[in-house]
Image (cartoon, grey):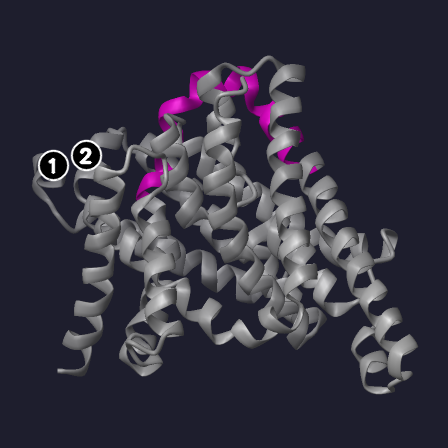
Amino acid sequence: MKYIKQLSIILLVSLIGEALHYFIPLTIPAGVYGIIILYLLLYFKIIKLQDVKPTGEFLIDILPIILIPSAVSLLNYFELLKVKALGYILTAIVSTVIVMFAAGKITDIIILKELKNENKNKSGKKAKTQAKVKP
Amino acid sequence: MDFLNSSVFFGTVLSLLAYFLGFYLKKLIKKNWFNPFLFAVILVIVILLIFKIPYKTFYNSSKYLDFLLTPATVCFAIPLYEKTHILKKNFKAIAIGILTGVITSLSCIWAAAKIFGFTHNEYVTMLPKSVTVAIGMDLSKSLGGYTGITVAVITITGITGSVLCPFLCKIFKIQSSVAKGVGIGSCSHILGTSEAYNLGETEGAVSSLSLVIAGILTVFAAMLFSNLH
């Protein structure tokens, strides 16, 4: 019974996500609507974490297997890849480095600034340990 | 051949065995550039080509796995919910950091599309490349991209991120654990996250919540960006 309940909740949320994707003319996948709905259900304590967690962990665990069939469709694009593969790979690698820099550095600057202000206000020791660089 | 066409298990079992072999090799090799998922995808492609099995035959007997994609994606809410307290504590920094990462990623793809002369379909194929595969694949599909290429590009991005991130944190002098997590989660999603856990518990937790939020924000931002090229 435990798994029936969990599976029912997850599939019901998926169904609502699917319906929203169908009726709202935006390119938002059903799964993303689902994440937001399930998060809100958990956040407002409408459902308990234990009511979805074991099945949820199972589904996330087998996710790579779920994705393989669609990923294999790569072999339909060999003609395109012959010409463009280098461009794709270069784009992926270079942009990864840039995104890491932008996202990480901005967050770092904001956090260090917040810590400085905190230290100014109460010169606390607690905040300092959070920013400590790990070896 | 007739058997393969009528089978409903062939593709699923082939996928499972390929992934299992990849997982086993990962244990043997112990290198972070070796990715069992990418290995499995390449192995399945090679097997289909050698035995001249059409993709359609394989897909018809493995498409049942697709059924689970949306439910599995929905479950990303669970790790996100479990890390709500970390998010609340550093809300401003994390939110601005992820948003910057998402906009930067989409802008990079837009620039690359201009440089390499991508068609519109190729451009939307590349747009979700920093997002976790479950969300990125669906996004690519709804924007009209080539999902197979999207998955490959996302995986390459993830591998790049998980290999380079520890060095990049040093080179860019990113100091706080939260910032490292945000950077790794926004640029290299689930593959980088396992590497982030090697740097520390906070890095890993922040990375795993960042990848979900980055995924959601990318979906919304991509609606604007998809019309730009």
In the figure, is residue A37 to the left or right of A112?
left
Residue in the image at 41% along x and 43% along y:
B41
In the figure, is residue B199 to the left or right of A33?
right
Classify mark 1: helix, strand or loop.
helix
Alpha carbon of mark 2 to alpha carbon of mark 1: how far?
6 Å
Asked whether B1 falls inside the magenta stretch, the response is no
In the rendered image, residue B164, in percent from the top left (x then y), is placed at: 73, 51
Q: Which mark is residue B5?
A: 1
Residue in the image at 56% along x and 19% along y:
A84
Res A36 → quadrant:
bottom left
In the figure, A88 relative to A21: above or below? above
The residue singled out by tag 2 in the image is B57
Classify mark 2: helix, strand or loop.
helix
The magenta span reads A69-93
Residue type indicated by callout 2: Thr
Residue type indicated by callout 1: Asn
Q: Please rate how many residues cluster around mark 2, counting C-alpha atoms within 10 Å: few if below 14, some from 14 to 19, many from 20.
A: some
Instruction: Name the main secondary structure of what is drawn in magenta.
Output: helix
Asked whether A71 falls inside the magenta stretch, the response is yes
